[in-house]
Amino acid sequence: MEIGIMLSVAVGDHPGQEHLTPDEQLKKAKAVGVNNVQLGCPPDEFLAGDGFMSLKKRIEESGIRVTTVFCGFEGESYADIPTVKQTVGYVPEETRAERIEKTYAISEFAKGLGVDAVAAHIGFIPHDEEDPLFQAMVETMRKIADYCAQNGQVFSLETGQETGEALLHFLKAVDRQNLKVNFDPANMILYGCGEPIAAMETVKEHIVSVHAKDASWSEHPGETWGTETPLGEGDVGMDRFVDKLKQIGFDGYITIEREIAGPEQIEDMKKGVALLRSLVEDGKERKGK
Ligand code: MG
C-alpha cells in the first residue's frame, strides 16, 4: 500500500478547489513528500496536442507517478447536497452526451500518460431500479466502461453518493468487469450514506483504489453536509480504515484527499502521510513479532 495525494479537480465548482496549473499541482506532491498522485481532470488545453505533450514531459521529469485520472465536468457544483444531485456526473440529461464524450477524451489523455485507471463521481444513482434514470445510468456506465476497456483501463466509481448496498446493486446491474470502486470513506459520512467500514465490506471485491479522507457526521445526515476534517480527527477512524484495507487484502494506492487550499492543505497532507505510514507499518511489525 503506497501513499499518495489527490491533486485537485481543475474544472467545475469543488470545495477547496484552486485553479492551479498542472505544474503547480505537481509541486504539491513534492512538498508533501510523495511520489504518486491521482490527477483531477486538467483544463482542456492539456488534454491533447502540444499542451498534452508538454504536460506529459513535465510529469515524466517530475518522477511522479499518476495512478488515476479523475473526470470533472463544466457545470458541476458541490455547493450543497441538492445542488450535487442536480449537477454532478452523468445524471443531468442535458449534458450527459457531452460528458460521455469528455470522458472518452479523458480516457485517451490517461492512456497517453500510461495510466490504467479513470474515475469519476458519476452522480446520484436512483435507488429505485424502475426509475428511468437508473437504466440511463446503467447504459451510460456500460458505454464508458467498454470505451475504457479498449484502452486497457478500469473505470472507478467514487463512493459516497449512495449506500454500499446500492452501489453493489448498481455494479451488478452494469455488469462490466472493468467497472470498479474508488472508495472514499469520508464521502459516506459527508453525504450521510452509511457507516464507511461496513460499506467497504459490502463492495470489497470491487475496490481498486481508495481516498484517505476524514469527516464528521452532519446533525442531519443526507440533508446537509458533514464536515471534512484532517485525517484522524473525524469519524472514519483511520486505524479501522487501514485495518480494513489490510483485512480485504488491498494492495493498491492510498490517495490522501484534503479538500482545502493553501499551506494548511500541504501541512494536513504531510501529517496524513505520517499517520497512514505508521498505521500501514503497524501491522507489518505485529506480523514480524
Ligand atoms: Mg474522494
Image (tube, grey):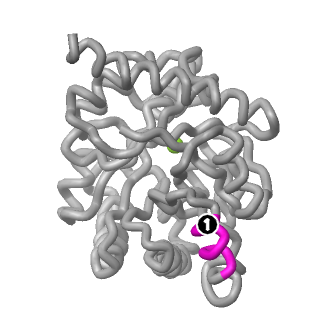
Q: Using a 10 Å C-alpha cutoff, classify the residue at mark 1 as few (fewer than 14 neighbours), some (14 to 19) or many (20 or more).
A: some
Numbered disc 1: secondary structure: helix
Residue type at tag 1: Ile
Quarter of the view holding residue 75? bottom right
* Residue 196 pos. (x, y %): 37, 27
Quarter of the view holding residue 46? bottom right
Magenta span: predominant SS is helix
* Residue 3 pos. (x, y %): 47, 39
Residue 187 is a magenta residue: no
108 vs 72: above or below:
below
Residue 59 is a magenta residue: yes
141 vs 265: above or below:
below
Please state, as top left, top right, bottom left or bottom right, where the N terminus lies in the image: top left
Q: Residue at x 25, y 64 (%)?
A: 178
Q: Residue at x 49, y 54 (%)?
A: 121
* Residue 147 pos. (x, y %): 34, 79
147 vs 167: above or below:
below
* Residue 207 pos. (x, y %): 29, 45
Please state, as top left, top right, bottom left or bottom right, where the C terminus lies in the image: top left
Whether residue 145 sits left or right of residue 9 in the image: it is left
Q: Residue at x 29, y 81 (%)?
A: 150
- For disc 1, the marked residue is 59
Q: Which residues are magenta?
A: 54-61
